[in-house]
Image (cartoon, rainbow, N blue to C red):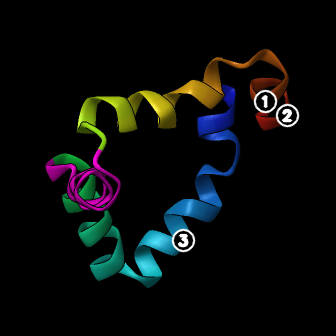
Amino acid sequence: MKWLLRNFGERMGDILRNPRYALDSLYREFTLADERFLSIIIGISIRRIRAFLGEAIHTPDFAARLL
């Protein structure tokens, strides 16, 4: 959770400078648009792609570098 809040002020500044980009990004996240795109191209299910994306944070060495 620390890594999420680490650069909160900087990210809020980015959101305020680019509200359209921030909203588009949230939309893509909620609709799984990027995962669907990858799924079509490489022929892997959306569930597997989401698992791949979440895998790195469960690696202790990687997670420690985010803190």
Q: Earlier in the sequence, mark 3 or mark 2?
A: 3
Q: Position of residue 15 (x, y in %)?
A: 43, 70
Residue picked out by circle 2: 65
CA distance separating discs 3 and 2: 23 Å
Can you say which quadrant of the picture contains the N terminus?
Answer: top right
Q: Which residues are magenta?
A: 31-43
Q: Quadrant location of residue 6?
A: top right
Give above or below for 58 relative to 13.
Answer: above
CA distance separating discs 3 and 1: 26 Å
Give above or below for 29 relative to 48.
Answer: below
Residue at 64%, 63% (x, y): give it.
10
Marks 3 and 1 in Cβ contact (< 8 Å) = no
Q: Nearer the viewer, residue 2 or 40?
A: 40
Residue picked out by circle 3: 13
Could you tell whether 1 is left or right of 29 in the image?
right
Marks 1 and 2 in Cβ contact (< 8 Å) = yes
Q: How packed is label 3: few (under 14 Cα within 10 Å), some, or many (20 or more)?
A: few
Could you tell whether 33 is left or right of 52 in the image?
left
Could you tell whether 49 is left or right of 35 in the image?
right
Can you say which quadrant of the picture contains the C terminus?
Answer: top right
Name the element at disc 2.
helix
- Three-letter amino acid code at disc 2? Arg
Viewer-nearest of discs 1 and 2: 1
